[in-house]
Image (cartoon, helix red, strand yellow):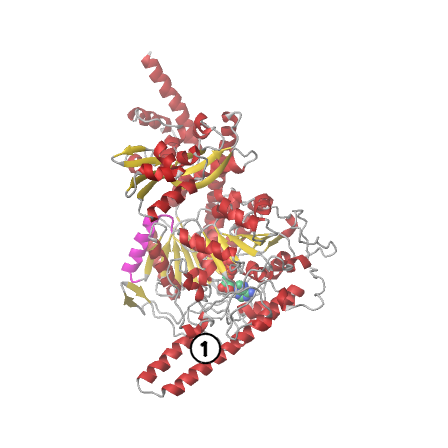
Amino acid sequence: MDSDSDSDGSHVSATPPRDSFPPSPPPLLQSPPKHVPPVSRKITSSSSRSKPKALTQPPPNPSQEAPTSFSPPPPPPSPLFTDLPFRICESQPARFSSSISSFSRLRTRASFTPNEKLKSDGVDFVPEPPQLEVIAPPKSVRRKPPNLITDTITSPPVKPMVFRSSGNGEGNFVKLNLNGKRGKKFPSKYKGVSKSRSNYAFRGKRYKKKEADGGDGESLLEEESDLQKQVEEEANGFISSVEDAILAVKTEASDENLTKLLNLVYGYDSFRDGQLQAIKMILGGSSTMLVLPTGAGKSLCYQIPAMILPGITLVVSPLVSLMIDQLKHLPSIIKGGLLSSSQRPEETTETLRKLREGIIKVLFVSPERLLNVEFLSMFRMSLSVSLVVVDEAHCVSEWSHNFRPSYMRLKASMLFSELKAECILAMTATATTMTLQAVMSALEIPSTNLIQKSQLRDNFELSVSLSGANRMKDLLILMESHPYKEIRSIIVYCKFQYETDMISKYLRDNNINAKGYHSGLPAKDRVRIQESFCSNKIRVVVATVAFGMGLDKGDVGAVIHFSLPGSMEEYVQEIGRAGRDGRLSYCHLFYDNDTYLKLRSLAHSDGVDEYAVGKFLTHVFSTETKQQEMICSLVIESASQKFDMKEEVMQTILTHLELGEVQYLRMLPQLNICCTLNFHKSSPNTLAARSTIVAAILKKSHVKQGLHVFDIPAVASSICVATTDVLAEIQALKMKWEVTYELKDPAFCYTILKSPREICSLSSHLTKWLTEIESCKVRKLDIMSSAAVAAISVSNTSELSSGAKQTQSLQSRIFDYFNGDEKCDTPSKMTQNCAFLRADIKVFLQSNRQAKFTPRAIARIMHGVGSPAFPNSVWSKTHFWGRYMSVEFRVIMDAAQTELFNFVDRNAALAT
Ligand SMILES: Nc1ncnc2c1ncn2[C@@H]1O[C@H](COP(=O)(O)OP(=O)(O)OP(=O)(O)O)[C@@H](O)[C@H]1O
């Protein structure tokens, strides 16, 4: 990895005394040496968790229990600067975004005229408003946003505004390494000067140019060096202020001291609702569940503790793009890093090195990486973890809208025992009471440690309209009418990838500057579109759910749902991307019955039958895999076809077998298991004589057209090494030009620890659980649909303006939903029976005698939903495809089961 990108003015060294600061101090917080007494240990709060504490940690003081009466012990007699757990090496002025700091709830977007468009590189863009660049000493520059979540939102007095270029504070060097590109470097003389001061570098260049043009070069250079001195003085002043503020918080984590730190680092005057409370709980060592609306400022709740706590803060995130965004938005005084499975090996090595050397203070990590053996061993050996942050914590629960099997690994017992984590912070914007209970129980967060504010900001105008075949036209009419036509940034959400292309094209054809976005686009295109949207070069992004997580664009003025969201959680998350600047924003939803039915059918696509689960388990625990320590593998594509299960469903079952009540197996890293090896230089036998791994490869491979083909887990098992060792060996040989190789067949890998006594009861138990998850998904959709229909109906009966009435109706539904009152009161649109259903199934079976159906497979086809064994590409051609979408899925399955029995009986009778 290109370590030069570290040199974004940064220099890190071990905790020296204050006096030894170099004159031009570099920027970042550094992890402490392990002996430094952590501040959290001086502070106790209401935690009742009885996790074992590190030996160095004094017992909590029971007299300081409640977080509200938070009062840490008096400061040590003479706090030496060396007590700081890290050193601040470079100044960074308070961070600003270029978003306008006017927080009146009334959105006035008159400055934008949609017709003001230019074309550039084939992308339409609207001209940006002039950006004013003001450089001022950090302390004098403040952003004055309102507290979005307080009860009342008042317009603050107008203050002079400071605009910065849209660099958006990319002060974090590690981010620059992500693409393997070299960070933009300052001229060497600016080393140690924060990136945000690139203006100075720029001015320097201008002066030099003047000099070349015959200007008074000497005086310009003098001016430049004066300027640099001034910058350094400011930087020093800023650093020492932040250091003092951190020390003050370490000594006493009072509201005043924390607010001062907030003000210095972020430029904000006050904490928003919930922030201070959360920060104090964490500093007091209490694991906390934090539920704040989107855009409420949850990140700050771990960033500030990360500055204070002595060890590393690990942030677990579900998506790499989210981690990249979060890393990018870290204040530059906190040094961050990222570990994900999609990184290149050299990037991983570099990050691990920085971790070991204590350079990284906040590490973003995917759940898979977090509990990987190599990673864990590092923590066991040398690193201390002060805080584990579980971002998007609802993913832990199967009852959430976005359950991730890999999040099941994040059990408190594992985090505490394997990582020796001292405290856990779980954060989400959307969780029902049931989800919260599941998350808090998995993470062992006491119920008293829940900080929960309203899950919806109050600056939305919500509306719904009934739509039909003309939805695209309806969308266009909406976008051409007030207030949407005046809004500069809009997100349109739809459900299917093809819709994003189709709708964005339609909008472009109608002179609306729009782009489609979905996960099927190449990563670089997605980044480009998001960046163009953030810099207002694209006005409308038409996207699937893939867009928006971690998007912190303050001035998105509207979110339009072209299709019904799958759940209230999804709706709240997506509308939450609007109005993050606190201004009134508009959210419209087009409701149409066909989409509802289609989504309802899709909600069944992850469901499984006991028969399939049983078959799957029999394979997993088959005799040849029973051998202890043998590395077993399941090639994803073929298994998916064989058991007619999606990859995620198989992963969920395997994870459950690992993390459920009984640990039946241990999951190993997923990999491409089939290797085709070509020897180039030395003969295979010569290499085998030198390496046991090569010898094992020769033994276990078969030769096909001169190439050795082998199964990596089989080779690894035969000599009791890890699959990663085999991979490392062939990689090393490749570097020496000895071999070339190709890998294929991505597979789940695991070792069996225990076989179930009875596959039958295990499969019945698992099927019941998976069926509940399936029903929960369907119910979430029904509740969302019901809320939308209710809002449409109030607009017909209302005396108030329909906008206000609809907003009220949806708000109250959302409120009730997240408080456990799941209203689903509109009559079901699904038919319970149908006269021709059984006759049609009979005909279908007769005309497809060759295929082996299950009742579920038939129900899916009748609902128009493809599956691995019955893909759309083949089965959508049948006459019955999607014909019974409006009939309850379960009703079709029951009918199919009866008809299948009849069919088998008839065939058996015919055969005899
Ligand atoms: N106390 C504060 N005063 C003003 N602005 C703040 C404050 N705290 C955070 N912010 C700003 O609010 C914005 C949103 O913060 P952040 O991204 O942490 O929100 P979030 O709760 O994580 O949102 P999401 O759930 O959508 O990811 C950021 O620009 C952040 O700088």
At which x and y percent is residue 141?
A: 52, 75
Looking at the rendered structure, the kind of residue marked 1 is Val
Please state, as top left, top right, bottom left or bottom right, where the C terminus lies in the image. top left
**Residue furthest right in the image:** 63
Answer whether residue 501 is magenta in the image. Answer: yes
Please state, as top left, top right, bottom left or bottom right, where the N terminus lies in the image. bottom left
At which x and y percent is residue 46?
A: 68, 53
Q: Can residue 247 be seen by looking at this rendering?
A: yes
Left or right of 37, for residue 27: left
Foreground of the two, 538 or 340: 340
Residue at the (71%, 55%) spot, across then down: 65
**Residue furthest top in the image:** 912
Residue range (magenta):
494-511
Q: Quadrant of residue 205?
A: bottom left
Q: Mark 1 sits on what residue?
A: 134
Foreground of the two, 646 or 243: 243
Foreground of the two, 505 or 478: 505
At which x and y percent is residue 793?
A: 46, 50
266 lies above or below 612? below
At which x and y percent is residue 545?
A: 41, 51
Answer whether residue 159 is magenta in the image. Answer: no
Q: Secondary structure at mark 1?
A: loop
